[in-house]
Amino acid sequence: MFKHILVPIDGSATSQLAVDKAIGLAKAFGSQVTAIFVIDPYPFTGVGTDFAYGQAEYLSAASAEANAAIKSAKAVFKAADLAVETAVVESNNAWRGIVQKAESSQADLIVIGSHGRSGLERLVLGSVTQAVLSHTHLPVLVVRT
């Protein structure tokens, strides 16, 4: 039924639940799986040397966090005896990066956690999740904690 599943991850417990659900679906349907981590390459709105230093520090930390989450997801898929393609996607909006990657990779299902772990987004149905639901034509499985 589903040939290609996209799983956005952010290192949170909820995204881990989404990975677990994607594993079950991939095994049931023989699906290809892509796990992605989206980072915003330009989160600051400033100028000058302080901005440049802050930007470099941010990108270094964001890349390290993304790589750690990707490595962890790969290990979970490997333990389940499933191959997974991974990518770190840069986008000014996490939802946009998710939707664009789903479309470009020809995914036919997005499996996403209901809440991420960033700031106020964890207080309501994740604003990223809500935006993905609003902006994609693909089926979306929202995994709740």
Image: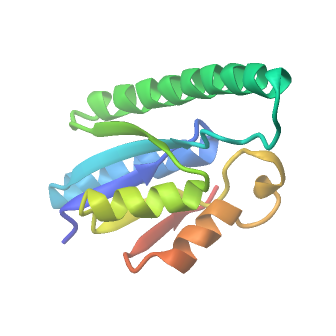
Q: Quadrant of residue 131?
A: bottom right
Q: Quadrant of residue 94?
A: bottom right
**From the viewer's perspective, is 88 left or right of 1?**
right
The correct choice, above or below, for 53 with respect to 143 in the image is above
Front-lying residue, 71 or 51: 51
Front-lying residue, 141 or 129: 129
**From the viewer's perspective, is 45 left or right of 12?**
right
Q: Tell me where residue 98 appears, x and y as whole percent.
A: 47, 57
Identify the residue at horizontal 67%, vertical 21% (top origin): 56
| Residue at the front extreme, as displayed | 48
Q: Quadrant of the N terminus?
A: bottom left
Q: Quadrant of the C terminus?
A: bottom right
Q: Quadrant of residue 48?
A: top right
Colour scheme shown: rainbow
Identify the residue at horizontal 40%, vertical 80% (top origin): 137
Q: Tell me where residue 134 appears, x and y as whole percent.
A: 56, 79
Q: Tell me where residue 78 appears, x and y as whole percent.
A: 28, 28
Labels in figure, total: 0
Front-lying residue, 112 or 143: 112
Q: Tell me where residue 92 appears, x and y as whole percent.
A: 61, 52
